[in-house]
């Protein structure tokens, strides 16, 4: 799980800036719509939809927005037909990238992703070129200022988590995707309030780069995640202990 080290803290600090871009609701609405289309509108029977709705609520999305997105997915309201795409790519320093997208126009999305990669020192790869490096995991984050590592560790393992890691400002609970919601809900019942919770791709094999190359990778990830159609970007970059963030 070392590939996730320090990314949590960096992404958490970016959260306010990401929200200012005004795109986070759009991305979550897409995910809710697709989840409802694939698995139906019943939250209890559709884990993917429950996860998406939890994320929406964490971002204070109005209930009406959530309900409309579900109805568009189930066909009760007219909506856009989104396609799920995964791009595999390389960034500066040979870093591996997994880019997840939801789009109604795959030609547009491919062109946008390719343009950002090219301008930022990366390139698209063939299907399977980096996917083998990643595994899907549930990640639930808690503030290290609010809870101790021992508190989270004991409660998380009792709830069925796989591991707990200390990322400095954040404590990460790691689960198998199938156990993600069970662990999250058990932690909530026990009184623990998460900072964020998602099922994402984590790299088993990582690379560490110098400061300048790391800056380039982080800027590339930012630019990719700023695209309307890109839902998330995973990488196998290990943030070095002596990394100095850009001003």
Image: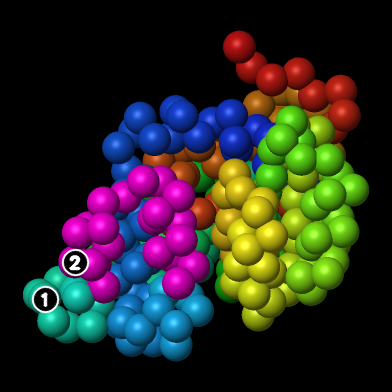
Residue under numbered circle 2: 68
Percent coordinates x, y for residue 51 in the rendering: 49, 67
Tell me whether the residue at label 2 lies in contact with that at label 1, contact meaning CB atoms closer than 8 angstroms. yes
Percent coordinates x, y for residue 215 in the rendering: 66, 27
State which quadrant residue 14 falls in.
top right
Report whether residue 207 is seen.
Answer: no
Q: Please name whichever residue, 16 or 101, is drawn nearer the observer in this view of the structure.
A: 16
In the image, residue 85 lies in the stretch drawn in magenta: no
Report whether residue 215 is seen.
Answer: yes
State which quadrant residue 126 falls in.
bottom right
Give residue 77's mark. Answer: 1
Helix, strand or loop at mark 2: helix
Helix, strand or loop at mark 1: loop
Q: Is residue 103 left or right of residue 145?
A: left
Query: Residue at horizontal 31%, vertical 50%?
Result: 61
Give the residues drawn in magenta, as a range. 50-70
Q: Please name whichever residue, 73 or 112, is drawn nearer the observer in this view of the structure.
A: 73
In which quadrant is the N terminus drawn? bottom right
Query: Residue at horizontal 26%, vertical 51%?
Result: 62
How far apart marks 2 and 1 lie (CA) works out to 7 Å
Give residue 1's mark. Answer: none
């Amino acid at each position: 799980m070392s590939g996730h080290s320090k990314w949590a803290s960096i992404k958490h600090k970016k959260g306010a800036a990401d929200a200012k871009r005004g795109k986070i609701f759009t991305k979550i609405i897409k995910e809710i719509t697709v989840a409802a289309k694939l698995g139906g509108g019943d939250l209890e029977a559709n884990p993917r939809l429950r996860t998406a709705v939890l994320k929406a609520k964490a971002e204070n999305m109005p209930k009406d927005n959530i309900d409309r997105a579900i109805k568009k997915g189930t066909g009760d309201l007219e909506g856009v037909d989104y396609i799920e795409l995964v791009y595999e790519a390389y960034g500066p320093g040979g870093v591996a990238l997994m880019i997840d997208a939801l789009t109604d126009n795959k030609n547009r999305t491919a062109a946008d992703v390719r343009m950002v990669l090219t301008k930022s020192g990366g390139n698209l790869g063939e299907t399977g070129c980096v996917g083998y490096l990643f595994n899907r995991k549930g990640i639930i984050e808690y503030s290290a200022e609010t809870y101790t590592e021992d508190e989270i560790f004991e409660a998380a393992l009792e709830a069925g988590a796989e591991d707990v890691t200390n990322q400095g400002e954040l404590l990460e609970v790691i689960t198998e995707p199938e156990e993600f919601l069970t662990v999250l809900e058990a932690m909530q019942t026990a009184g623990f309030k998460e900072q964020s919770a998602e099922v994402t791709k984590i790299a088993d094999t990582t690379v560490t780069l110098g400061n300048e190359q790391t800056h380039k990778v982080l800027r590339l990830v930012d630019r990719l995640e700023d695209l309307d159609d890109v839902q998330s970007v995973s990488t196998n970059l290990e943030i070095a202990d002596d990394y100095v963030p850009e001003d």
